[in-house]
Image (cartoon, grey):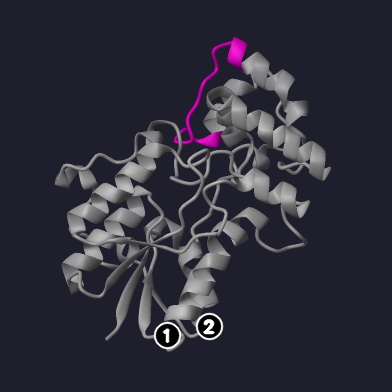
Amino acid sequence: MTKHIICYSGGHSSALVAIEVVKKFGKDNVILLNHDISANVENEDIKRFKQEVADYLGLPITFANNPNWSIKDQFDITMDQGGFKFGNSTAICTYQLKTEPFEKYLKDNFSDKDCIIYYGFDKNEMHRIQRRSSILGEKGYKTDYPLALWERTIQSTKELGIEPPNTYSVWKHANCTGCLKAGKQHWYLVYLHRPDLWEKAKKAEELIGYSIIKDKYLDELEEDFSKLKCQGITTTEHEDGRTFMARARKVIKIENEDLFSKPCECFV
């Protein structure tokens, strides 16, 4: 019997995928596959949300975790490894916290590949759909993308009485706070909202000897970020990066604009 594996991140999109798949196929062969990460960087309201949706569906959450997930966040892992990424490979934190446990889970449980793997990409993310379909297709796995390819039956978990994570008021994704693949707009928000993670990220840069953002170390950004903060310049990840840059440019000099609003694209 084909199993339906939801890449269940804890974000709103993956929750909607889970709901759509259960509506279409029933819950008996649906797996909510999550990679739990440290509460230091995954907000407790994200953990609340993914459990509430699972409870609504009457399904357990299946965890495929890094052995040290509860005590090591992305900064600890990269400091242990002595780098943020090696060559053109994916970020070390993404690989160890998500990709490696995901691949091990598939190998241990679905070597026969009798499954379909579902992602929460929407119609605006066709490039990600093509890339993920190709990567898993080469390994013999089928993928599907209900939010992009199916006729939708639900637009928000609010329709079910389940509030999305409150983190969406600031952050665009339910990924790690302090994403090592994101741009300056994300890191300005870390500076404003999580000074503890800002300091830990600076420590990681110092130990590793390489910057998280391509052109600047975080301590080199502090003077500009302090000016923005003192001038009351705030933002969220929902604000278009160009709009934020236009406002920030009145206070500071903007360099390498393409790096300013670079998004995180973690998914497994």
Span shown in magenta:
229-241
Residue 168: quarter of image: top left
Kind of residue sitting beneath label 1? Lys
Point out residue 80 in the picture as x, y percentages from the top left corner.
73, 51
Label placed on residue 139: 2
- Residue 258 horizontal side relative to residue 55, left or right: right
For image coordinates 78% across by 27% down, the residue present is 220
User: Badge 1: few (under 14), some or many (20 or more) residues near its Cα, within 10 Å?
Assistant: some
Estimate the spatial distance between the alpha carbons at disc 2 and disc 1, rounded to whole Å: 9 Å
Q: Earlier in the sequence, mark 2 or mark 1?
A: 1
Disc 2 is placed on an element classified as: loop
For image coordinates 17% across by 66% down, the residue present is 23
Point out residue 55 in the picture as x, y percentages from the top left corner.
21, 53
Point out residue 260 in the picture as x, y percentages from the top left corner.
63, 37
- In the image, residue 250 sits, relative to residue 160, either above or below, namely above
User: Badge 2: few (under 14), some or many (20 or more) residues near its Cα, within 10 Å?
Assistant: few
Disc 1 is placed on an element classified as: loop
Q: Main secondary structure of the magenta part?
A: loop
- Quarter occupied by the N terminus: bottom left
Residue bearing mark 1: 113
Q: Kindly indicate whether the residue at mark 1 contacts the one at mark 2 (C-beta within 8 angstroms).
A: yes
For image coordinates 38% across by 49% down, the residue present is 11
Observer able to see residue 210: no
